[in-house]
Each structure stands twice: as structure tokens, then as C-alpha cells.
Image (cartoon, rainbow, N blue to C red):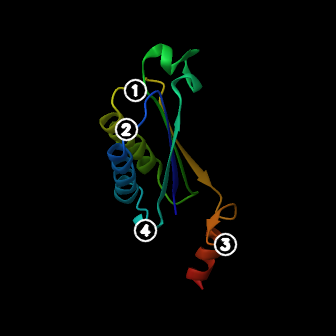
Amino acid sequence: MPFINIAVAGSQLSLAQKQQLFDETTRLMNEVMRKDPSLTAVRIDQFGANDWAVGRRSAAIRGETAVHMDIKVTAGTNSDEEKAEMIRRAMAMLKEVVGAIPEASYIVIHDLDATAWGYDGRTQHSRASARAA
């Protein structure tokens, strides 16, 4: 049940680019992180070029598109190697879909405690306990 938020500033993505980000992010989460595509949520937030700065200079001044990907998964469900591979492949995918982005474009994977999040009104811990019983 991963949740991925992709934030973009500096250019407006086309509908085709957004769909490609939805598709490719979900595919990578399945291939690399072993997450169920039917439970993978991806949200894209777009910001104006003057709303994001890297090195104290806005994306408008830099003439760049800034990107940040924030991934939330249940702690203990992925190895360090899987997370490193996800970061590597997701960055390559972002560059392919969005184009040139600053070096200071981050992908952050949050390992959340199973008792601290869930979906459909149940925590991940509750779901895992029910499967084990």
C-alpha cells in the first residue's frame, strides 16, 4: 500500500506526462519494491516556477523544472538494496518523463510503522495480524 507524491515546479506537465508518471511509478513500485499495483497511489502536485528554489534561486530564475518524489511504505517490507534501486530507477524515469532537472532533486523513501498508517480504515499492522491468524 505505497503512497507516492511527486511534486513538480517550473513547468506544467501535459496529461500524457502525468499519465506516464502514474504508469511508470506504479510499475517501478511493483518491479522493484514488490508492491501491489492495485493498491499503489500516486499523486502529482504542480507548483509555479517561483514557488520552488534550489540553491536560493527559484526554478524560474534557474530556467529548470524542479522535482521531488516522496514515497511512503510500511517499515520492514523492503531491503536497503531495493530502496537504493528504487531511488536509482525512479530518478532515471523522472528525467526521462520530465526532462532536465537540477542535481538537487530528491527521492525520499519513508519507512512508516505499520501501526501508524493504513487504508480503508485499517492499519497495516491490523491487516498483517489478520493474515497471520
How far apart are the two marked residues, 2 and 4, measured between alpha carbons? 22 Å
Q: Of the residues shown, which amino acid type is indicated by label 3?
A: Gly
Q: Of the residues shown, which amino acid type is indicated by label 1?
A: Ile
Q: Are marks 1 and 2 in contact (CB under 8 Å)?
A: yes
> Closer to the N terminus: mark 2 or mark 4?
4
* Residue 17 lies in quadrant: top left
> Closer to the N terminus: mark 3 or mark 2?
2
In terms of secondary structure, where does tag 4 sit? helix
Q: Residue furthest bottom?
A: 133
Residue 130 coordinates in the image, percent (x, y): 61, 82
Q: Are marks 3 and 2 in contact (CB under 8 Å)?
A: no
User: Label 3 belongs to which residue?
Assistant: 121
In this image, 109 relative to 15: left or right?
Answer: right
In terms of secondary structure, where does tag 1 sit? loop
User: Label 1 belongs to which residue?
Assistant: 101
Identify the residue at horizontal 42%, vertical 21% (top origin): 64
User: Label 2 belongs to which residue?
Assistant: 94
Q: Any mark on residue 38, and which?
A: 4
Q: Nearer the viewer, residue 64 or 26?
A: 64
Residue 15 coordinates in the image, percent (x, y): 36, 46
**Label 3 environment density (alpha carbons within 10 Å; few <14, some 14–19, many ≥20):** few
Q: Is residue 31 above or below residue 122?
A: above
In this image, 17 relative to 45: left or right?
Answer: left
How far apart are the two marked residues, 1 and 3, measured between alpha carbons? 37 Å
**Label 1 environment density (alpha carbons within 10 Å; few <14, some 14–19, many ≥20):** many
In terms of secondary structure, where does tag 3 sit? loop
> Closer to the N terminus: mark 4 or mark 1?
4
Q: Of the residues shown, which amino acid type is indicated by label 2?
A: Leu
Q: Of the residues shown, which amino acid type is indicated by label 4?
A: Ser
